[in-house]
Amino acid sequence: MRAVIEKRRVAPEIPGYTYGTSDVAKSPISVAELEQPKQSVGFTTEDEANLKMAGDVLADQTKALVETWRGAIAKIPHLARHSKDLDGKPIPRYSEASRPRFQQWILDTCFRPYDQDWLNYQEEIALRHTSAKKNLTDDVESTPFIPLRDVIAF
């Protein structure tokens, strides 16, 4: 049982990871409303089962996957700038602090139930890409927000 639990957490403590806590913003979308976009894209219980299988495969590879994604972002200047300071220099402590959260997001996507806590944390993640909360979690000074077009495109 312990191995299963460890596969679902990248670390016992993840700085800035507030899933399921009162610090997380409340999603304006209800679980019932989530069913509509799931229906629109044809997302089924079989897809949920497949995500769990993918999570079993990816659980030990989240660090490499995040590094691959970050490598792709680093090659696209208009995306890379959002994780650098305002002078365009890397912010190593931001990269280090956000890496385990990004890794945990992969596992949460694969293993967590799509309930209100999940919806709330997706709202929190979204807000952390807007001027409402970007840079606050890690106390950094970078771009004030990430345009939705960049989030969607990536």
Image (spheres, rainbow, N blue to C red):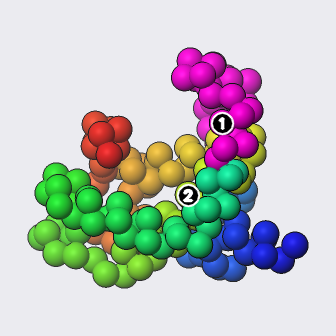
Compare residues 82 and 141 and report the one nearer the observer: 82
Q: Name the residue under label 1.
A: 47
- Residue 74 screen position, x and y as percent: 22, 64
Picture residue at 71% right of the left edge, 59% below the top:
21
Q: In this view, does 38 lie above or below 89?
A: above
Numbered range of the magenta stretch: 24-51
Instruction: Return the mark for residue 133.
Output: none
Give the class, few, some or many, for how many residues have Cα within 10 Å of label 1's Cα (few <14, many ≥20).
few
Examine the structure image and report whether residue 38 is included in the region drawn in magenta.
yes
Give the class, few, some or many, for how many residues have Cα within 10 Å of label 2's Cα (few <14, many ≥20).
many
Picture residue at 36% right of the left edge, 74% below the top:
95
Q: Is residue 87 above or below residue 26?
A: below
- Residue 32 screen position, x and y as percent: 73, 24
Secondary structure beneath label 2: helix
Picture residue at 64% right of the left edge, 78% below the top:
11
Q: Is residue 108 above or below residue 64?
A: above
Q: Mark 2 points at which residue?
A: 106
Examine the structure image and report whether residue 151 is included in the region drawn in magenta.
no
Secondary structure mostly seen in the magenta stretch: helix
Image side of residue 9 versus residue 147, left or right: right
- Callout 2, which amino acid? Ile
- Callout 1, which amino acid? Asp
Image side of residue 27 versus residue 144, left or right: right
Marks 2 and 1, the one that precedes in the sequence: 1
Q: Of the residues tagged 2 and 1, which is closer to the observer? A: 1
Q: Distance between the residues labelled 2 and 1?
A: 15 Å
Quadrant for residue 92, please give it.
bottom left
Image side of residue 21 versus residue 38, left or right: right
Would residue 121 be visible to someone looking at this image? no
Would residue 74 be visible to someone looking at this image? yes
Image side of residue 15 versus residue 114, left or right: left
